[in-house]
Image (cartoon, helix red, strand yellow):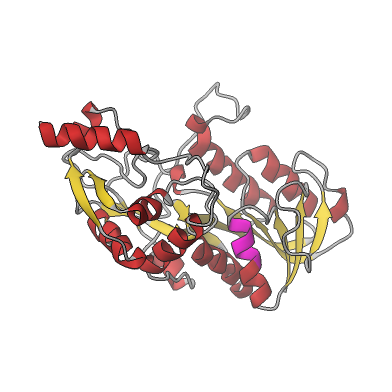
Amino acid sequence: MKILILGGTTFLGPATVETALESGHELTLFNRQKTNADLFPEVEKLKGDRNGDYDALSGRTWDAVIDTHAHLPRWVRLAGDALKDSVGQYVFVSTCSVYPLPWRGSVAEDAPVEELPDGVEEEPFGNEKYGALKVLCERAAEERFPGRTTIARPGLIVGPGDPTDRFTYWPARIARGGEVLAPGKPDSEVQFIDVRDLGAFLVKCVEDGHAGVYNTVGFDGRLSMQEMLHGCKTAVNTDCSFTWVDEEFLAAQQVGAWMEMPLWIPTGDDEAGHFDVSAAIAAGLTFRPPAETMRDTADWAATRAEDHRPRAGLSQGKEEAVLSAWHAR
Protein backbone atom coordinates (compact mmCIF):
# COMPACT_ATOMS: atom_id res chain seq x y z
CA MET A 1 0.00 0.00 0.00
CA LYS A 2 1.02 3.63 -0.46
CA ILE A 3 1.19 5.36 2.92
CA LEU A 4 1.92 9.01 3.67
CA ILE A 5 3.29 9.76 7.13
CA LEU A 6 3.17 13.29 8.52
CA GLY A 7 6.39 13.65 10.49
CA GLY A 8 7.93 10.22 10.92
CA THR A 9 11.34 10.98 12.40
CA THR A 10 10.94 11.55 16.14
CA PHE A 11 9.63 8.63 18.27
CA LEU A 12 6.33 7.06 17.24
CA GLY A 13 7.02 8.03 13.63
CA PRO A 14 10.14 5.87 13.21
CA ALA A 15 8.46 2.89 14.91
CA THR A 16 5.58 3.19 12.46
CA VAL A 17 7.89 3.61 9.47
CA GLU A 18 9.93 0.56 10.43
CA THR A 19 6.83 -1.63 10.70
CA ALA A 20 5.45 -0.38 7.40
CA LEU A 21 8.75 -1.00 5.60
CA GLU A 22 9.01 -4.51 7.05
CA SER A 23 5.51 -5.16 5.70
CA GLY A 24 6.53 -4.08 2.21
CA HIS A 25 4.56 -0.84 1.93
CA GLU A 26 5.58 2.18 -0.14
CA LEU A 27 6.15 5.18 2.13
CA THR A 28 6.38 8.93 1.79
CA LEU A 29 7.44 11.12 4.72
CA PHE A 30 6.22 14.72 4.85
CA ASN A 31 7.96 17.04 7.29
CA ARG A 32 10.21 20.08 7.60
CA GLN A 33 13.33 17.88 7.29
CA LYS A 34 14.79 19.40 10.44
CA THR A 35 14.55 16.54 12.97
CA ASN A 36 16.60 13.39 12.32
CA ALA A 37 16.57 14.18 8.62
CA ASP A 38 19.10 11.43 7.91
CA LEU A 39 16.73 8.65 8.98
CA PHE A 40 15.35 6.27 6.35
CA PRO A 41 17.43 7.33 3.33
CA GLU A 42 15.60 4.71 1.25
CA VAL A 43 12.22 6.40 1.79
CA GLU A 44 10.77 9.24 -0.30
CA LYS A 45 10.73 12.51 1.63
CA LEU A 46 8.74 15.61 0.79
CA LYS A 47 9.42 18.93 2.45
CA GLY A 48 6.66 21.12 3.80
CA ASP A 49 5.18 22.65 6.93
CA ARG A 50 2.02 21.86 8.87
CA ASN A 51 1.30 25.57 9.16
CA GLY A 52 0.06 25.54 5.58
CA ASP A 53 2.82 24.57 3.14
CA TYR A 54 1.42 21.42 1.50
CA ASP A 55 2.51 22.23 -2.06
CA ALA A 56 4.78 19.17 -2.22
CA LEU A 57 1.74 16.88 -1.87
CA SER A 58 -0.16 18.39 -4.79
CA GLY A 59 -1.12 15.94 -7.53
CA ARG A 60 -0.21 12.86 -5.50
CA THR A 61 -2.41 10.08 -4.09
CA TRP A 62 -2.00 7.63 -1.21
CA ASP A 63 -4.07 4.84 0.27
CA ALA A 64 -3.73 6.33 3.73
CA VAL A 65 -2.08 9.04 5.78
CA ILE A 66 -0.83 8.49 9.34
CA ASP A 67 -0.69 11.60 11.52
CA THR A 68 1.34 10.88 14.65
CA HIS A 69 1.93 14.28 16.19
CA ALA A 70 -0.75 16.93 15.75
CA HIS A 71 -1.98 18.72 18.88
CA LEU A 72 -3.46 21.81 17.24
CA PRO A 73 -6.82 21.46 15.44
CA ARG A 74 -5.65 23.93 12.82
CA TRP A 75 -2.91 21.51 11.76
CA VAL A 76 -5.45 18.74 11.18
CA ARG A 77 -7.83 21.04 9.33
CA LEU A 78 -5.04 22.18 7.01
CA ALA A 79 -3.80 18.63 6.41
CA GLY A 80 -7.33 17.37 5.88
CA ASP A 81 -8.17 20.12 3.40
CA ALA A 82 -5.00 19.35 1.46
CA LEU A 83 -5.50 15.57 1.46
CA LYS A 84 -9.22 14.78 1.61
CA ASP A 85 -9.46 14.15 -2.14
CA SER A 86 -6.14 12.35 -2.52
CA VAL A 87 -6.01 10.00 0.49
CA GLY A 88 -8.35 7.14 1.30
CA GLN A 89 -7.94 6.88 5.08
CA TYR A 90 -6.80 9.28 7.80
CA VAL A 91 -5.18 7.65 10.83
CA PHE A 92 -4.85 10.11 13.70
CA VAL A 93 -2.99 9.55 16.97
CA SER A 94 -4.94 11.20 19.74
CA THR A 95 -4.65 10.58 23.51
CA CYS A 96 -6.53 9.10 26.45
CA SER A 97 -6.33 12.61 27.92
CA VAL A 98 -9.49 13.34 25.92
CA TYR A 99 -11.32 11.71 28.84
CA PRO A 100 -11.82 14.13 31.77
CA LEU A 101 -10.11 13.41 35.08
CA PRO A 102 -10.54 11.69 37.43
CA TRP A 103 -10.58 8.39 35.56
CA ARG A 104 -12.77 5.91 37.41
CA GLY A 105 -14.10 2.49 36.55
CA SER A 106 -13.84 1.12 33.03
CA VAL A 107 -13.26 3.86 30.46
CA ALA A 108 -14.45 2.87 26.98
CA GLU A 109 -14.38 4.80 23.72
CA ASP A 110 -17.92 6.12 24.18
CA ALA A 111 -17.14 7.83 27.51
CA PRO A 112 -17.59 11.64 27.72
CA VAL A 113 -14.69 13.71 26.40
CA GLU A 114 -13.18 17.07 27.20
CA GLU A 115 -14.67 20.24 25.72
CA LEU A 116 -12.86 23.54 25.28
CA PRO A 117 -14.57 26.01 27.68
CA ASP A 118 -16.53 28.89 26.19
CA GLY A 119 -14.33 31.89 25.59
CA VAL A 120 -11.08 29.88 25.57
CA GLU A 121 -9.19 30.13 22.28
CA GLU A 122 -7.62 27.10 20.65
CA GLU A 123 -4.27 28.83 20.32
CA PRO A 124 -1.72 29.28 21.66
CA PHE A 125 -1.34 25.71 22.83
CA GLY A 126 -1.35 25.06 26.57
CA ASN A 127 -1.07 21.80 28.50
CA GLU A 128 -4.28 22.62 30.35
CA LYS A 129 -6.08 22.47 27.00
CA TYR A 130 -4.33 19.36 25.72
CA GLY A 131 -7.24 16.91 25.96
CA ALA A 132 -9.84 19.33 24.62
CA LEU A 133 -7.61 20.28 21.68
CA LYS A 134 -7.09 16.63 20.79
CA VAL A 135 -10.87 16.18 20.75
CA LEU A 136 -11.12 19.04 18.27
CA CYS A 137 -8.34 17.42 16.20
CA GLU A 138 -10.33 14.18 16.11
CA ARG A 139 -13.46 16.00 14.98
CA ALA A 140 -11.56 17.93 12.32
CA ALA A 141 -10.25 14.66 10.88
CA GLU A 142 -13.68 13.00 10.86
CA GLU A 143 -15.27 16.04 9.24
CA ARG A 144 -12.85 15.83 6.33
CA PHE A 145 -12.72 12.03 6.12
CA PRO A 146 -16.22 10.93 7.20
CA GLY A 147 -16.26 7.20 7.80
CA ARG A 148 -12.60 7.03 6.75
CA THR A 149 -10.96 8.22 9.98
CA THR A 150 -9.16 6.02 12.48
CA ILE A 151 -8.55 7.48 15.93
CA ALA A 152 -6.00 5.87 18.26
CA ARG A 153 -6.09 7.05 21.89
CA PRO A 154 -2.88 5.94 23.63
CA GLY A 155 -1.72 6.90 27.09
CA LEU A 156 1.96 6.79 27.91
CA ILE A 157 3.94 5.68 24.84
CA VAL A 158 7.19 4.07 25.98
CA GLY A 159 10.22 2.17 24.79
CA PRO A 160 13.66 2.70 23.26
CA GLY A 161 14.11 6.21 21.92
CA ASP A 162 11.57 7.88 24.22
CA PRO A 163 12.73 11.48 24.61
CA THR A 164 10.44 12.26 27.59
CA ASP A 165 11.92 10.01 30.33
CA ARG A 166 8.36 9.50 31.63
CA PHE A 167 8.90 5.73 31.58
CA THR A 168 12.63 5.45 30.94
CA TYR A 169 13.21 6.66 34.51
CA TRP A 170 12.21 3.26 35.91
CA PRO A 171 14.44 0.93 33.84
CA ALA A 172 17.34 3.39 34.14
CA ARG A 173 16.86 3.85 37.89
CA ILE A 174 16.48 0.14 38.58
CA ALA A 175 19.56 -0.62 36.47
CA ARG A 176 21.51 1.68 38.81
CA GLY A 177 20.62 -0.61 41.72
CA GLY A 178 20.42 0.14 45.43
CA GLU A 179 17.34 1.20 47.37
CA VAL A 180 14.60 2.38 45.01
CA LEU A 181 11.70 4.56 46.15
CA ALA A 182 8.44 2.98 45.02
CA PRO A 183 5.37 5.23 45.10
CA GLY A 184 1.93 4.73 46.57
CA LYS A 185 0.02 1.46 46.51
CA PRO A 186 1.87 -1.64 45.27
CA ASP A 187 -1.34 -3.01 43.71
CA SER A 188 -2.28 0.18 41.82
CA GLU A 189 -2.70 -0.45 38.11
CA VAL A 190 -0.36 0.95 35.47
CA GLN A 191 -1.09 1.11 31.74
CA PHE A 192 1.30 2.00 28.94
CA ILE A 193 2.09 0.87 25.41
CA ASP A 194 5.38 0.05 23.73
CA VAL A 195 5.95 2.45 20.84
CA ARG A 196 6.63 -0.49 18.53
CA ASP A 197 3.30 -2.09 19.36
CA LEU A 198 1.43 1.15 18.72
CA GLY A 199 3.25 1.69 15.42
CA ALA A 200 2.35 -1.84 14.33
CA PHE A 201 -1.32 -1.25 15.19
CA LEU A 202 -1.45 1.96 13.14
CA VAL A 203 -0.11 0.11 10.12
CA LYS A 204 -2.52 -2.78 10.66
CA CYS A 205 -5.45 -0.34 10.74
CA VAL A 206 -4.34 0.82 7.29
CA GLU A 207 -3.88 -2.73 5.99
CA ASP A 208 -7.28 -3.88 7.26
CA GLY A 209 -9.14 -0.61 6.64
CA HIS A 210 -10.26 -0.25 10.26
CA ALA A 211 -12.02 3.07 10.93
CA GLY A 212 -13.41 4.29 14.24
CA VAL A 213 -12.04 5.11 17.69
CA TYR A 214 -9.73 2.82 19.65
CA ASN A 215 -8.23 3.06 23.13
CA THR A 216 -4.63 1.93 22.70
CA VAL A 217 -3.27 2.14 26.22
CA GLY A 218 -2.44 -1.43 27.34
CA PHE A 219 -2.74 -4.27 28.30
CA ASP A 220 -4.67 -7.44 27.53
CA GLY A 221 -5.08 -7.93 31.28
CA ARG A 222 -3.90 -5.79 34.19
CA LEU A 223 -0.45 -4.87 35.45
CA SER A 224 0.24 -3.49 38.93
CA MET A 225 2.97 -1.03 39.84
CA GLN A 226 4.58 -3.74 41.98
CA GLU A 227 4.53 -6.26 39.13
CA MET A 228 6.03 -3.69 36.79
CA LEU A 229 8.88 -2.73 39.10
CA HIS A 230 9.78 -6.32 39.99
CA GLY A 231 9.47 -7.31 36.36
CA CYS A 232 11.84 -4.53 35.45
CA LYS A 233 14.29 -5.69 38.12
CA THR A 234 14.25 -9.17 36.62
CA ALA A 235 14.50 -7.86 33.06
CA VAL A 236 17.59 -5.74 33.68
CA ASN A 237 19.16 -8.32 36.03
CA THR A 238 20.17 -5.91 38.74
CA ASP A 239 20.49 -5.97 42.52
CA CYS A 240 18.05 -3.49 44.01
CA SER A 241 15.37 -3.27 46.69
CA PHE A 242 12.09 -1.37 46.74
CA THR A 243 10.84 0.80 49.57
CA TRP A 244 7.15 1.61 49.27
CA VAL A 245 6.26 5.11 50.42
CA ASP A 246 2.60 6.04 50.84
CA GLU A 247 0.78 8.79 48.97
CA GLU A 248 0.33 11.09 51.96
CA PHE A 249 4.03 11.06 52.81
CA LEU A 250 5.04 11.67 49.21
CA ALA A 251 2.67 14.65 49.08
CA ALA A 252 4.16 16.04 52.30
CA GLN A 253 7.63 15.68 50.78
CA GLN A 254 6.41 17.54 47.67
CA VAL A 255 7.03 14.62 45.36
CA GLY A 256 5.07 15.24 42.19
CA ALA A 257 2.95 12.55 40.59
CA TRP A 258 3.54 11.39 37.01
CA MET A 259 6.52 13.58 36.10
CA GLU A 260 8.65 13.06 39.24
CA MET A 261 7.22 9.59 39.86
CA PRO A 262 6.38 8.27 36.39
CA LEU A 263 3.18 6.23 36.08
CA TRP A 264 2.11 7.13 39.62
CA ILE A 265 -1.29 8.80 39.92
CA PRO A 266 -2.50 9.26 43.53
CA THR A 267 -6.04 7.96 44.01
CA GLY A 268 -6.62 8.28 47.75
CA ASP A 269 -9.25 5.72 48.76
CA ASP A 270 -10.60 5.42 45.23
CA GLU A 271 -9.72 2.82 42.64
CA ALA A 272 -8.00 4.16 39.55
CA GLY A 273 -9.74 3.93 36.21
CA HIS A 274 -8.93 1.26 33.65
CA PHE A 275 -8.94 2.00 29.93
CA ASP A 276 -10.85 -0.65 28.04
CA VAL A 277 -8.75 -1.75 25.06
CA SER A 278 -10.92 -4.67 23.95
CA ALA A 279 -11.98 -2.93 20.72
CA ALA A 280 -8.38 -2.34 19.67
CA ILE A 281 -7.42 -5.91 20.55
CA ALA A 282 -10.27 -7.16 18.38
CA ALA A 283 -8.90 -4.99 15.57
CA GLY A 284 -5.42 -6.50 15.89
CA LEU A 285 -3.59 -4.64 18.65
CA THR A 286 -1.04 -6.89 20.37
CA PHE A 287 1.32 -6.26 23.28
CA ARG A 288 4.84 -7.56 23.71
CA PRO A 289 5.76 -8.67 27.26
CA PRO A 290 6.39 -5.63 29.50
CA ALA A 291 9.72 -7.17 30.52
CA GLU A 292 10.88 -6.93 26.91
CA THR A 293 9.99 -3.23 26.82
CA MET A 294 11.81 -2.66 30.09
CA ARG A 295 14.95 -4.52 29.04
CA ASP A 296 15.14 -2.82 25.64
CA THR A 297 14.53 0.59 27.20
CA ALA A 298 17.24 0.03 29.81
CA ASP A 299 19.69 -1.07 27.10
CA TRP A 300 18.89 2.03 25.04
CA ALA A 301 19.12 4.35 28.05
CA ALA A 302 22.60 3.01 28.78
CA THR A 303 23.78 4.32 25.40
CA ARG A 304 22.86 7.93 26.14
CA ALA A 305 25.50 10.50 26.93
CA GLU A 306 26.77 10.52 30.50
CA ASP A 307 25.70 14.15 30.88
CA HIS A 308 22.10 13.38 29.83
CA ARG A 309 19.72 15.40 32.00
CA PRO A 310 16.44 13.51 32.50
CA ARG A 311 13.22 15.39 31.78
CA ALA A 312 11.22 13.32 34.27
CA GLY A 313 11.80 11.30 37.41
CA LEU A 314 13.22 12.01 40.85
CA SER A 315 16.76 13.30 41.08
CA GLN A 316 19.12 11.04 42.99
CA GLY A 317 19.50 13.63 45.72
CA LYS A 318 15.77 14.08 46.25
CA GLU A 319 15.14 10.35 46.25
CA GLU A 320 17.77 9.85 48.93
CA ALA A 321 16.32 12.71 51.02
CA VAL A 322 12.77 11.34 50.82
CA LEU A 323 13.90 7.81 51.70
CA SER A 324 15.90 9.14 54.64
CA ALA A 325 12.89 11.06 55.92
CA TRP A 326 10.67 8.01 55.48
CA HIS A 327 12.99 5.79 57.53
CA ALA A 328 13.30 8.47 60.22
CA ARG A 329 9.58 9.07 60.68
Establish if 36 lies above or below 292. Answer: above
Specify the quadrant of the image occupied by residue 38: bottom right
Farthest left residue? 329
Instruction: State the residue at coordinates (32%, 61%).
Output: 232
Farthest top residue? 119
- What is the x, y in percent for residue 197? 50, 66
User: Is 196 displayed left or right of 80 in the figure?
Assistant: left
Establish if 296 lies above or below 115. Answer: below
Q: Nearer the viewer, residue 126 or 21?
A: 21
Q: Nearer the viewer, residue 290 or 319?
A: 319
Q: Is residue 105 visible?
A: no
- What is the x, y in percent for residue 239? 26, 60
User: Is 193 displayed left or right of 136 in the figure?
Assistant: left
- What is the x, y in percent for residue 36? 71, 52
Instruction: State the residue at coordinates (55%, 21%).
Output: 119
The segment highlighted magenta reads 12-17
Q: State the quadrant of the C terminus.
A: top left
